[in-house]
Amino acid sequence: MADTKKAVDTDAATGTPLGDASLDQLFREARTYNGWLDQPVTDAQLHELYALARMGPTSFNCSPMRVVFVRSPEAKERLAPALVRANVDKTMAAPVTAIIAQHRRFWESLPRLNPHKDVSAMFRDNPEFAAETAFRNATLQGAYLILAARALGLDCGPMSGFDKHQVNAEFFPDGEIEANFLCNIGYGDPEAVWPRNPRLDFDEACRID
């Protein structure tokens, strides 16, 4: 039994690069969509989306991201006043708008999420460090959410054009959770996508020391 388990672990650690079709779907051909087809995103899809996104790594498995999936017309109307003008129409048309947020007191869950060592005190007793950790890791988790959505055949339109304080007051009035960014999710309209902008080359953005 031990030998079998070891073989499984070894195979899993080796990994196999994804094929071109998968890399295209996740990165090379994926786009930020500004228009949406009239095709709903179901509860089951949202549950599957989160189930994938939550598996990405975070510091001490702290998992500070919290998400509100804004889908009903009533919830969209609550969100609309916080959006910059350029983001209103596409957000109202999107099947779902995810409010990616972080829990300020994420460390309260650390005894359960990181059971082999209770590190909650390092965050509880250092609010500035806790805020930095929450923001960094929730942003990472938001990126995982985008990749998970693309992996499931959905399209995304992440946005930062909104009034964070208005969103917090409307959706997180207890002050424990803070909005980070928004992401429209659904099935993108290929007729409503802009030409792809250039990206920095390796030598412009990276170095190997």
Image (spheres, rainbow, N blue to C red):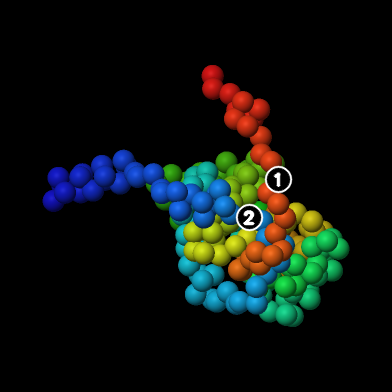
Q: Residue at x 54, y 61 (%)?
A: 149
| Mark 2 / mark 1, whichever is N-terminal | 2
Where, quadrant-wise, is the C terminus in this rendering?
A: top right
The residue sitting at 54% across, 70% down in the picture is 46
Q: How many labels were placed on the picture?
A: 2
Judge whether residue 139 can be spotted in this image. yes
Q: Is residue 124 left or right of residue 8?
A: right
Please tell me which residue lies in front, 183 or 100: 183
Residue at 69% from the left image edge and 65% from the top image edge: 191
Residue at image location 52% in from the left, 47% down from the top:
58
State the residue lying farthest toward the top: 209
**Horizontal and vertical percent position of residue 24:** 51, 51
Say what amino acid the circle numbered 2 marks. Arg
Disc 2 crowd rating (10 Å Cα; few below 14, some 14-19, many 20+) is some
Label 1, secondary structure: give it. Answer: loop
Q: Disc 1 residue type?
A: Asn
**Mark identifier at residue 197:** 1
* Circles 2 and 1 in contact, beta carbons < 8 Å: no
Residue with the mark numbered 2: 31
Q: Position of residue 17 (x, y in %)?
A: 39, 44
Q: Spatial distance from mark 2 to mark 1, Cα to Cα?
A: 10 Å
| Residue 169 visible, this orientation | no
User: Residue 188: where, in percent of width, then height?
Assistant: 64, 66
